[in-house]
Image (cartoon, helix red, strand yellow):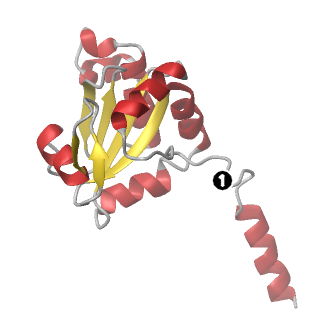
């Protein structure tokens, strides 16, 4: 009986104070990025964030598990962006930012030159990719990268210099 009590206590203490439904990182959409641009502008967002990934990518899984699940990350990104995910191996149809029909994998590989994953891409409200990073980013660096986009610091300096100034 004590074992059950301790297991229950551990489960309750380790359960987050918020539910997954309250803090889902990615927005739902119908794979129409031209419409998503309008939605982002209407919602007064700074832009669109797209997480390009592969299902079997261990660094992508680590970002989902350790970064996208953090409340400060979720709150910041929900405030400033519409957030979407693209599987670079998927044959799902989508409409790109210009209204052209294509597949997710073509949108990733040809339009956004994604090879290795994960790729963290930030687009302005015209659908132009302004900031891109390939590889895992921890919570602190991910928030800093997003802030780099929001502040439009990419117009004046490289991210590495921005990062040094903000450490």
Seen as rendered, the residue at the extreme bottom is 1
Name the quadrant of the N terminus: bottom right
Which residue occupies 71% across, 62% down?
A: 15
* Residue 163 occupies quadrant: top left
Q: From the top left corner, tell me how far across and down residue 148 is, in percent.
A: 37, 20
Residue 140 in view (yes/no)? no
The residue to which callout 1 is attached is 21
Q: From the top left corner, tell me how far across and down residue 21 is, in percent.
A: 66, 53
Q: Nearer the viewer, residue 65 or 113?
A: 113
* Residue 111 occupies quadrant: top left
Q: From the top left corner, tell me how far across and down residue 110 is, in percent.
A: 11, 43
As helix, strand or loop, the secondary structure at mark 1 comes to loop
Which residue occupies 50% across, 47% down?
A: 28
Seen as rendered, the residue at the extreme right is 1
Which residue occupies 55% across, 33% down?
A: 78
Which residue occupies 41% across, 36% down?
A: 142
21 to 38, vertically: above or below:
below
Q: Nearer the viewer, residue 102 or 2?
A: 102
Answer with left or right where residue 24 lies relative to residue 10: left
Answer with left or right where residue 120 lies relative to residue 70: left
Q: Nearer the viewer, residue 1 or 75?
A: 75
Answer with left or right where residue 65 lies relative to residue 93: right
116 to 143, vertically: above or below:
below
Query: Count of labels shown?
Result: 1
Q: Nearer the viewer, residue 130 or 143?
A: 130
Q: Residues within 10 Å of mark 1 (few under 14, many from 20)?
A: few
Residue 80 in view (yes/no)? yes
Name the quadrant of the C terminus: top left
């Amino acid at each position: 009986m004590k074992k059950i009590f301790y297991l229950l206590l551990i489960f309750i203490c380790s359960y987050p104070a918020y539910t997954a439904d309250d803090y889902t990182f990615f927005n739902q959409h119908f794979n129409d990025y031209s419409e998503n641009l309008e939605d982002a502008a209407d919602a007064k967002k700074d832009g669109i964030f797209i997480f390009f990934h592969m299902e079997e990518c261990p660094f992508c899984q680590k970002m989902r598990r350790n970064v996208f699940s953090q409340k400060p990350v979720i709150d910041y990104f929900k405030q400033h962006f519409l957030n979407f995910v693209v599987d670079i191996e998927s044959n799902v149809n989508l409409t790109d930012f210009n209204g052209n029909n294509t597949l997710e994998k073509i949108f990733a590989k040809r339009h956004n030159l994604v090879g290795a994953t994960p790729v963290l891409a930030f687009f302005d409200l015209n659908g132009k990719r302004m900031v891109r990073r390939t590889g895992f980013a921890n919570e602190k660096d991910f928030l800093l990268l997003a802030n780099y986009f929001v502040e439009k610091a990419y117009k004046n300096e490289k991210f590495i210099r921005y990062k040094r100034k903000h450490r």
